[in-house]
Image (cartoon, rainbow, N blue to C red):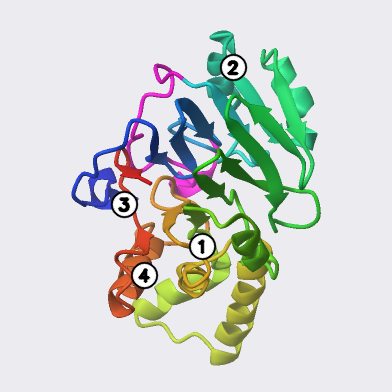
Amino acid sequence: MPQTESLVAVQPEIEPNSDYSITMVGHSTFLVKMAGVNILTDPVSTSQLFPYAPFGYGKRISPAGLNLYETPVKVVVLSHSDPDHFEPRILKAIAQKGKTIAVCHQPLAGRLEKLGFTVVESLAENQSTQIGEITITAVHAEHRGQNKAVGFIFQDEGRTVYFAGDTGNFQDIEAIAKTYKPDIAILPIGEYPPLPLAVAKYFISKGFNIPQVLIDKLKKLEEIKRKKVHMSPEDVLLLSKHFHQIVVMHHGTYFLGGHIDPNEPADLMRRLIEENQLGDKITILAPGQSLSF
């Protein structure tokens, strides 16, 4: 198992603007501040996603950037129900405070009500709700088939944030960029390789001979997964021409499938940023770091 300290990105602190900033908590959990409203995305704080999984699978390997039990939140948004995006324990704790509005993908409404949320706004794709000065719109996400997940657009009169949730690099994501013109797009970069491909690469690194025909088949599976489940750093690179500013997520927080080395997505993203001189376009935040917009 990798050690926690090796996974925390070391970057200069970025001072958050009091009205417009995003703070990386971990994985796909961000605190988005817009016009005085605190929005928390897909909150997860557990130390182990899958308690009985072997080989440390699902173990948290980097600290949370904020204590979610103490952070004041006006709105919590839920993109889908996968365990690394939907944690009943922390959601119940947030609900018990009694002042937080839950905005969710439509199929999750009943679960959130059972957890104690008294105000639940459930959205299908392209539906919106208004909370204070913020309009929240559910948009398409490509994640293991139809109606499995959504992304969200947060807008006020001056700024827009796109939180993609879990998604592959689907064909119409460019249309989201064109329609909403987000100031910040929060895009995932982890869990894109099929686990057998990661295992094969590991054994190749140890000197084992793996048939090329098998590697080629697994790479084709990776191409499908990048479109249908999780995008990769290469996809974020391609999409960077469509978005004003990108912050990456879904990496380096939990030991999850597809990466023998959990540093792999962020390391590859850093290399692509450097090679393409995109340091002003794509940002990797460490837990607790913030970016103003």
What x and y, as percent, mark residue 140?
Answer: 72, 54
The magenta segment: 50-72
- C-alpha separation, residue under disc 3 versus residue under disc 4: 17 Å
The residue that mark 3 highlights is 2
The residue that mark 1 highlights is 258
Nearer the observer, disc 1 or disc 2?
A: 2
- C-alpha separation, residue under disc 1 versus residue under disc 2: 30 Å
Q: Amino acid at mark 3?
A: Pro
First in sequence, mark 1 or 2: give its number. Answer: 2
Q: Is residue 76 in sight in this rendering?
A: yes
Nearer the observer, disc 4 or disc 1?
A: 4
Give the structural element (helix, strand or loop) at label 3.
loop
Within-10-Å neighbours for mark 3: few <14, some 14–19, many 20+: few
- C-alpha separation, residue under disc 3 versus residue under disc 2: 31 Å
Instruction: Say whether residue 231 is left or right of residue 291.
Output: right
Instruction: Say whether residue 95 is left or right of residue 105.
Output: left
Above or below, 203 against 266 in this view is below
The residue that mark 2 highlights is 92
First in sequence, mark 3 or 4: give its number. Answer: 3
Q: Quadrant of residue 20?
A: top left
What x and y, as percent, mark residue 258?
Answer: 51, 62
The residue that mark 4 highlights is 268
Q: Residue at horizontal 43%, vertical 53%? A: 251
What x and y, as percent, mark residue 290?
Answer: 32, 41
